[in-house]
Amino acid sequence: MEDEEQQVPGRVFNWDQLKEDWKQALSRGVTTAFAIDNVQQVAAFLLVMMVSLVMGAFHAVRHLGDFTLKLLHEVSYLVHALTPLMLGVLDFLSKCVGGLYLLVAMMFRGHGLPSQPQPPAYKTLPSIKYGRRTAGNW
């Protein structure tokens, strides 16, 4: 009669009985899961998985190195082909910047009255005198 009262919904469970049932179920599950055949199969699986991971990592590094070498080879061809273009672009940009500097310099230069240009000073040789000839100079 006491067992029937515990199975009615809303009543208090016998926690000791529940704990004992869980221990028995757990011990049965553990003993069947950790049988010697299962342990051997798990060990073999883990060994094969570790070996395959190590070999996969080795091959991945090898293929990555091969890919890197091929990529560098093709990039060297690209750089060789693009060098004249890049030099032209660099020359164009330097001329644009230089022209901008020249325009800024012209905007800020002085705008005073232009000075009269001085005639060039010619040196005369001491033995030759140039002048106007008159009738007495013949």
Image (spheres, grey):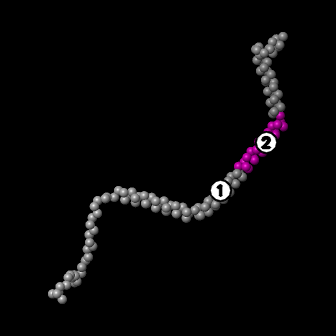
63 or 44, nearer to the observer: 63
Q: Residue furthest front?
A: 135
Give coordinates of residue 120: x percent, y percent: 27, 73
Tell me if 48 is positioned left or right of 97 in this view: right
Q: Which residues are magenta?
A: 35-57
Based on the picture, tell me whether residue 47 belongs to the magenta stretch: yes
Left or right: 15 with respect to 135?
right
Look at mark 1 in the image and give the residue it sits on. 68
Residue for point 52% across, 63% down: 88
Q: Disc number at residue 45? A: 2
122 to the left or right of 20: left
Disc 1 is placed on an element classified as helix
Q: Which of the 4 image quadrants contains residue 128?
A: bottom left
Tell me the residue at 80%/22% (across/down). Answer: 21
Pick the quarter of the image with the N terminus: top right
Identity, as a three-letter code, of the amino acid under mark 1: Thr
Q: Residues within 10 Å of mark 1 (few under 14, many from 20)?
A: few
- Residue 53 vertical placement versus 102 (above, below): above
Residue 40, percent across and down? 81, 39
